[in-house]
Image: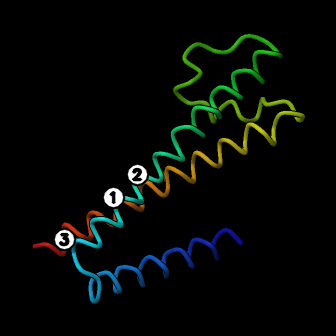
Amino acid sequence: MLEILVVLCVFVAMAGWVLASATVAVETVFMAGFWLVLGGLAFGVPTGLLYHLALRRSLLRHGPLPARWWLQPTQLNDKIPGADRRLVLGFCYAGAAGFLVTLLGCVVVAIGAWRSF
């Protein structure tokens, strides 16, 4: 099922590229990319912070945290107690979605830059 989603996303991205290259003004492409980046950061950064805080709180209830745990926190996801998994991983996935929207915005800005030449 995940593979189908990836293929659909690639097709949508390709269609968006063709549409942006053929019909949309360069300034519009730049502004769309800018707003995607801004929206992705505005959503992803707070949810990423909430993920780190929820993960820390959940894991501290069951023992000490490893040194520098915040650098690779997803390696600790398997240690989240069952009662906290839904909340903590919800923030994790939401932050990841915000990151993906930010990356999409960067790609759209790059398309605008490519078209401006």
What percent of the width, then of the height, locates residue 5? 63, 73
65 sits left or right of 112 in the view: right
What colouring does the structure picture have? rainbow
- Whether tag 1 and tag 3 are in contact, CB under 8 A, the answer is no
Observer-side mark, 1 or 3, equals 1
User: What is the spatial separation of the Cα atoms under label 1 and label 2, in whole angstroms?
Assistant: 6 Å
Q: Residue at x 28, y 63 (%)?
A: 109
Q: Secondary structure at mark 3?
A: helix
Q: CA distance from mark 2 to mark 3?
A: 20 Å
Residue density around tag 3, few if under 14, some if 14–19, many if 20 or more, within 10 Å: few
Q: Position of residue 22 (x, y in %)?
A: 27, 89
Direction left: furthest residue: 117
Which residue bears the numbered disc 3?
A: 114
Quarter of the figure that contains the C terminus: bottom left
Q: Are marks 1 and 2 in contact (CB under 8 Å)?
A: yes
Q: Which residue does the numbered mark 1 point to in the structure image?
A: 34
Secondary structure at numbered mark 2 = helix
Q: Amino acid at mark 2?
A: Leu
Please state the horizontal and vertical placement of residue 87, each as a whole percent of the image. 78, 39
Displayed quadrant of residue 49: top right
Three-letter amino acid code of the residue under disc 3 = Trp
The residue closer to the viewer here, 3 or 61, is 61
Q: Residue at x 49, y 76 (%)?
A: 10
Q: Which mark is residue 73?
A: none
Left or right of residue 58, residue 11 in this image: left
Q: Which residue is mark 2?
A: 38
Residue at image position (74%, 37%) is 88
Tell me which residue sits at (65%, 42%) in the image: 92
The location of residue 97, given as percent across then percent down, is 57, 54
- Between disc 2 and disc 3, the foreground one is 2
Q: Is there a contact, CB below 8 Å, between mark 2 and mark 3? A: no
